[in-house]
Image (spheres, rainbow, N blue to C red):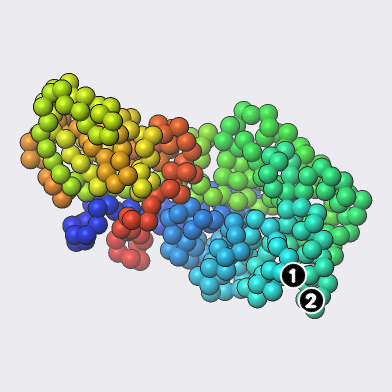
Amino acid sequence: MLYNFNINKKANSFLVIDVDAIVSNYQTLRSKLSNAHCAATLKANAYGLGIKKIAPALDKAGCSTFFVATLDEAVELRKILNSNRKSILVLNGFLAGAGRIFKHYNITPVLNNFCQLETWVDYNSTSEDRQKAALHLDTGMNRFGLDNKDIARLMKNPQILIKANIYMLLSHLACSDEPENVMNNRQLLEFRSLIGRLPKVTASLANSGGIYLGKKFHFDLVRPGLALYGSVPGHLQNNLTNCISLYGRVLQLREVDKGQLVGYGGTYKLTKRSRIATIGVGYADGYQRSLSGLSTVFHHDSPLPVVGRISMDSITVDISSLPDNKLEEGNFVELLGKNFTIDQAASLAQTVPYEMITGLGRRHYRYYNQIKDGL
């Protein structure tokens, strides 16, 4: 799809977010489930892509349960959805004194230790209508959730789950992006063992990668995050659609003689007379410095190598392979998209797609591609 970026003369870059593709990915994930419900994890402003656009689209597509990281994210999401019928859960737990906010906005905490569980029970005992909560059981990741000591206390007093109005038990997979990692089955067995010894409620284990580990990981509810945006590390055969494209404007063109150096530190030396384009996107915009000398941009599917170090606000590209005058100042090149995906960029940068997506800066002008918007 071609976009008339020149209608905005001020922008150095355009981030195109295909909301229709996100909805399609949600439907693809849901189709892999037999009896489990498919929630959506929209923490960190929907992974930096814009919760105000993405949440209503998923709501319209039938999603009724949403996970965020913090209470302020949950309050924002509740206002966006403009309905108390949808479940919103806060993964980062419950702090004493925050009960009235949870109640006012009908937000559900995910309790992460026994102290939070007791604090929640105390809060609920003062309320005429007890609010529900979820409980995180650690099964080996050693980050959030009840640890072994907490779980031992819980097993001695399982009725506290009724007092706390716990409606969901969940855990989180540490290695779902590595299908052959023995940790996956170890956590699965531990989770089964724990929920089998406690009152039966909704059970949830699978994140994005967990969905692709198979039905035995699905339980009652799955919580995809990154997969909504077309990426499932470690599971390449996923039938998901890329939803992110990033374009940068050509700010300057120049011819540079053989032997000249390009960029900070002079790390790139030209082996022949070359044409160099400077593009108005840099590491402050999420195009990571570690991609220096490794990544490729595209002009109408023609690959153009990034040369020299990536700067805060710009990158330099060798365009010598293009015919003269094919690329002009003010034109745009594709930095991320169908030719160079988030997954490929993350691999070259030796990081994860999560960091690539959430790191895309706020300076990009954004297009949201939705049928109803006519883009």
Does residue 106 sit above or below 4 in this rendering? below
Q: Are marks 2 and 1 in contact (CB under 8 Å)?
A: yes
Residue found 27% across the figure and 34% down from its top: 264
Image coordinates of residue 111 in percent, x first then y, are: 73, 57
Question: Residue visible at 70% across and 61% down?
Answer: 94
Q: CA distance from mark 2 to mark 1?
A: 8 Å
Residue most toward the left? 324
Residue 131 is marked as 1
Please tell me the numbered disc located at residue 139. none
Above or below — where is 328 with respect to 261?
below
Q: Is residue 32 left or right of residue 160?
A: left
Q: Which mark is residue 127?
A: 2
Residue 296, position as x, y percentages in the image: 29, 34
- On the image, which quarter does residue 160 sit in? bottom right
Total count of labels: 2
User: Measuring 60% from the left and 37% from the top, which residue is drawn there?
Assistant: 176
Q: Mark yes or no: residue 301 visible.
A: no
Instruction: State which quadrant residue 298 falls in.
Output: top left
Q: Evaluate whether residue 248 shows in this view.
A: yes
Q: Nearer the viewer, residue 199 or 333?
A: 333
